Amino acid sequence: MLKENSPLGPFQEDEHRVILSTSADSTVIGPGHHTTFVEKGQRYILYHRIFPQKESFVLRQLCLDSLNFDSNGNIKKVSTKGVQKFN
């Protein structure tokens, strides 16, 4: 039997389930295959997205953004603006 706090479920979808998605203006298309890490106390998400083009093949861009949380500990939607300076 699955316990409520188990990584195996049960899973309940809520407003925080999607933190990274294709943007309305199509500057971010098909983001995925991410990893997260912490550097100097800040969490980051490293992911790829499809580079918009009119070719018959797909080019991907590697993207780095801050990963932030609200006061309840929920992950906020990723800004997709990138990290300006990474020291």
Image: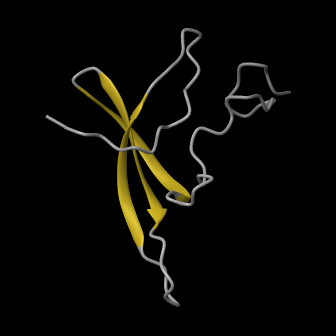
Q: Nearer the viewer, residue 85 or 8?
A: 85
Which residue is drawn at the image coordinates 70% and 25% (left, top)?
A: 6
Q: Nearer the viewer, residue 12 or 14?
A: 14
Of all residues, the one furthest to the top in this rendering is 71
Of all residues, the one furthest to the left in this rendering is 87
Is residue 5 rendered to the left or right of residue 83? Answer: right
Residue 55 appears at what percent x and percent y? 49, 88
Q: Quadrant of residue 20?
A: top right
* Above or below: residue 77 compared with residue 60: above
Residue 52 appears at what percent x and percent y? 48, 71
Which residue is drawn at the image coordinates 73% and 29% (left, top)?
A: 15
Q: Nearer the viewer, residue 33 or 59?
A: 59
* Above or below: residue 47 compared with residue 52: above
Q: Quadrant of residue 37?
A: top left
Q: Nearer the viewer, residue 66 or 43?
A: 66
* Quadrant housing the N terminus: top right
Q: Quadrant of residue 39?
A: top left
Of all residues, the one furthest to the bottom in this rendering is 56
Which residue is drawn at the image coordinates 63% and 53% (left, top)?
A: 24
Residue 35 appears at what percent x and percent y? 42, 45
* Above or below: residue 67 compared with residue 32: above
Is residue 40 rendered to the left or right of residue 42? Answer: left
Residue 43 appears at what percent x and percent y? 36, 29
* Quadrant housing the C terminus: top left
Structure colour scheme: secondary structure
Of all residues, the one furthest to the front in this rendering is 25
* Above or below: residue 29 compared with residue 70: below
Which residue is drawn at the image coordinates 77% and 31% (left, top)?
A: 9
